[in-house]
Amino acid sequence: MSNGPPGWPERVPPAGVPGWEEAAVSWLLDHCPADYRGYAAWRRHPAALAWVSTRHLEAQLDAMRGAWRDVRPELGPLLPPGTIAEVLDSLAREGLRLRAAHRGATLLLEALRLRAPMR
């Protein structure tokens, strides 16, 4: 569906298309903890949701980087021999997913900033 810039979320129509903000809110909420759905202000103010989503995704990326760094010494001794590669692969794939989600959230935030009224 996406015709936005590279990294624009596939489920979100391009900015300016009717319904794009509602789709953006849904996509952003799908990339945040379920509890975020309980905050009505973030649904009413998509730019605020996009802003907090980028921060949440940044924190997740930091956690994945830390896990990658620490997995061998901290988890290696607890796992059966030969399984650390599987864990590292999962961490790497999750890191790629998070980077893509962060890029999408950043693009949505930029688009929402452009449509925001000047104060």
Image: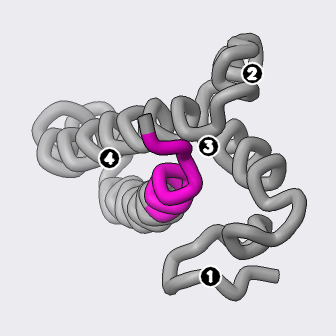
**First reached walking from the N terminus: tag 2 or tag 3:** 3
Callout 1 amino acid: Gly
Instruction: Specify the segment rendered in magenta.
Output: 107-118
Please indicate whether residue 103 sits to the left or right of residue 25 in the image: left
Task: Please name the residue that numbered disc 4 is placed on.
Answer: 61
The crowding category of the residue bearing disc 1, from other C-alpha atoms within 10 Å (few below 14, some 14 to 19, many at least 20), is some
Q: What's the distance in space between the residues labelled 2 and 3, CA to CA?
A: 11 Å
Task: Please name the residue that numbered disc 2 is placed on.
Answer: 37
Callout 3 amino acid: His
Foreground disc of the pair 3, 4: 3
- As helix, strand or loop, the secondary structure at mark 4 comes to helix
Colour scheme shown:
one colour
Task: Please name the residue that numbered disc 1 is placed on.
Answer: 4
- As helix, strand or loop, the secondary structure at mark 2 comes to helix
Residue depicted at x 62% and y 82%: 4
Task: Please name the residue that numbered disc 3 is placed on.
Answer: 31
Callout 4 amino acid: Leu
Q: What label sits on residue 103 in the rendered view?
A: none
Rendered view: 31 above or below 12:
above
The answer to the question of whether label 3 and label 4 lie on touching residues, with beta carbons closer than 8 A, is no
Q: What's the distance in space between the residues labelled 1 and 3, CA to CA?
A: 19 Å
Residue 92: x, y in percent?
Answer: 36, 64
Q: Which quadrant is home to the N terminus?
A: bottom right
Callout 2 amino acid: Arg
**First reached walking from the N terminus: tag 3 or tag 4:** 3
3 and 94: which is toward the camera: 3
**First reached walking from the N terminus: tag 1 or tag 4:** 1
Q: What's the distance in space between the residues labelled 1 and 2, CA to CA?
A: 25 Å
